[in-house]
């Protein structure tokens, strides 16, 4: 794949670091038909199989070899969490643009270093908080910005799923590798939405649970620090608003996908309630001003942008594979030389809140985010 294949147009050559199911289901299909860029290299244990399926011309066993290959303009860091920081810094030092999965790093200090290096190099970078792009959340953001609830009072978010109930070893629950469990894996998404909706988070009080008895040893036969599988977090916002967020990996829901998202937001002038069951339900209800009953607020066509909404998964596929969102928006921004968000600074901001939550759990008190 070369720039010459798209005459007269900028073309971004992308490499993927990581060859998991996530690269296969999110990043490769997103860029398969992008007019300004394409995946030209993959590095990872199963890179050859992915490359064959998606007709990617180059594969590498080592991530570092792809970074230094000269074949790419940008990389997607879709590896385990403990590799995010060193690989991102190596890519930035090589002059590459970077999309790095969340959580950005194991610590806020590392995440801040990543964001600072990106700013120094002028690289166009992204932290992919996926739920920002789903129609329910985009419409919630519009309603909030339009003053539907007025001055915000509080929000209450629930993200329940059940994948953490399995008791064997899983690197996502090994703090050395993941940094945190439910907190970083799923709560980070809703911390980002809370920040996006209500503004800066100034203080945190958290209780992190380790509710499932897991394998005592890792695959190498070594003991490891078990990460949280349940996160309950209270938030204070700079505006004076309050928040409550509960993210659990040990709570399978009675839905076909075993997962549910519920978001409640209240303010001086109204209330908004959203529910996504990851089957067919993705709805918003609201009460505004003198309304005495909740009414469904249909998501406008310009929010859907042609995405199917028969099932949530079809919406998800269309949003990320056909619309100018997340990975596709990042590649377009690189081609045009424009900034894009959420960037690494935004990712570092959420990492800071996460670290405040961990410290709060450990010390049993409110933690000021600015003190992290």
Image (cartoon, grey):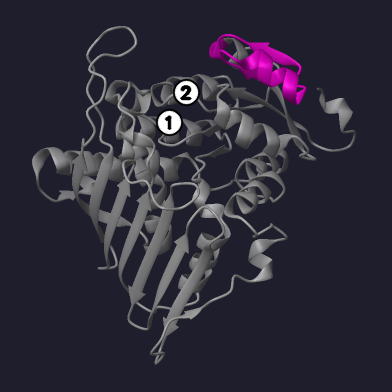
Q: Which residue is mark 2?
A: 89
**Above or below, comparing residue 124 to residue 56 in the picture:** below
Which of 310/33 is in front? 310
Q: Residue furthest bottom?
A: 290
On the image, which quarter does residue 82 sit in?
top left
Q: Is residue 303 left or right of residue 173?
A: right
The kind of secondary structure element at disc 2 is helix
SS for dot 1: helix
- Location of the C terminus (image quadrant): top left
Q: Earlier in the sequence, mark 2 or mark 1?
A: 2
Mark 1 = which residue? 114
> Whole-percent x and y of residue 258?
44, 47
**Magenta-span inclusion, residue 113:** no
Q: Position of residue 224 (x, y in %)?
A: 24, 18
Q: Is residue 131 above or below residue 218?
A: below
Q: Residue at (64%, 19%) from the top-left corner?
A: 42
Range of residues picked out in magenta: 42-64
Q: Residues within 10 Å of mark 2 (few under 14, many from 20)?
A: some
The structure residue drawn at horizontal position 37% and vertical position 84%, both measured from the top left corner, is: 269
Image vertical order of residue 61 relative to residue 282, above or below:
above
Which disc, if any, is residue 191?
A: none
The furthest residue to the left: 364
Q: Is residue 97 visible?
A: no
Q: Quadrant of the N terminus?
A: top right
Residue 309, percent from left and from top = 64, 60
Q: Quadrant of residue 176?
A: top left
In the picture, measured across the screen, residue 167 lies left or right of residue 44, that is left
Q: Residue at x 37, y 46 (%)?
A: 252
Coordinates of residue 286 in the picture (x, y in percent): 45, 78
Are the residues at dot 2 and dot 1 in contact (C-beta closer than 8 Å)?
Answer: yes
Q: Is residue 239 above or below residue 217?
A: below
């Amino acid at each position: 794949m070369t720039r010459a294949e798209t005459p007269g147009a900028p073309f971004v050559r992308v490499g993927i670091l990581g060859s998991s199911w996530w690269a296969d289901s999110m990043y490769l299909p997103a860029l398969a038909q992008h007019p300004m860029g394409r995946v030209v290299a993959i590095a990872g244990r199963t890179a050859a199989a992915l490359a064959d399926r998606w007709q990617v011309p180059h594969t590498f066993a080592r991530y570092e070899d792809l970074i230094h290959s000269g074949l790419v303009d940008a990389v997607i860091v879709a590896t385990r969490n403990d590799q995010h920081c060193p690989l991102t810094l190596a890519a930035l030092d090589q002059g590459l643009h970077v999309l790095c999965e969340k959580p950005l790093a194991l610590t806020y200090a590392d995440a801040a270093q990543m964001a600072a290096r990106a700013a120094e190099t002028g690289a166009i970078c992204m932290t992919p908080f996926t739920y920002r792009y789903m129609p329910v959340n985009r419409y919630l953001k519009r309603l909030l910005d339009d003053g539907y609830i007025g001055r915000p009072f509080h929000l209450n978010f629930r993200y329940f799923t059940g994948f953490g109930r399995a008791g064997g070893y899983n690197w996502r629950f090994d703090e050395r590798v993941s940094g945190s469990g439910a907190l970083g894996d799923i709560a980070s998404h809703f911390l980002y939405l809370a920040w996006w909706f209500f503004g800066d988070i100034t203080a945190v009080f958290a209780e992190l649970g380790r509710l499932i008895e897991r394998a005592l040893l890792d695959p190498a036969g070594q003991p490891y620090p078990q990460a949280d599988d349940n996160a309950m977090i209270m938030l204070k916002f700079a505006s004076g608003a309050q928040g409550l967020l509960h993210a659990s990996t040990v709570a399978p829901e009675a839905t076909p996908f075993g997962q549910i998202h519920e978001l409640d937001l209240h303010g001086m002038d109204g209330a908004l309630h959203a529910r996504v069951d990851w089957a067919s339900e993705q709805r918003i209800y609201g009460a505004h001003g003198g309304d005495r009953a909740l009414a469904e607020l249909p998501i406008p066509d310009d929010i859907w942008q042609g995405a199917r909404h028969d099932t949530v998964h079809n919406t998800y596929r269309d949003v990320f594979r056909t619309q100018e969102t997340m990975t596709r928006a990042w590649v377009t921004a690189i081609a045009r030389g424009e900034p894009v968000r959420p960037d690494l600074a935004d990712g570092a901001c959420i990492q800071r809140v996460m670290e405040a939550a961990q410290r709060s759990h450990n010390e049993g008190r409110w933690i000021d985010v600015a003190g992290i």
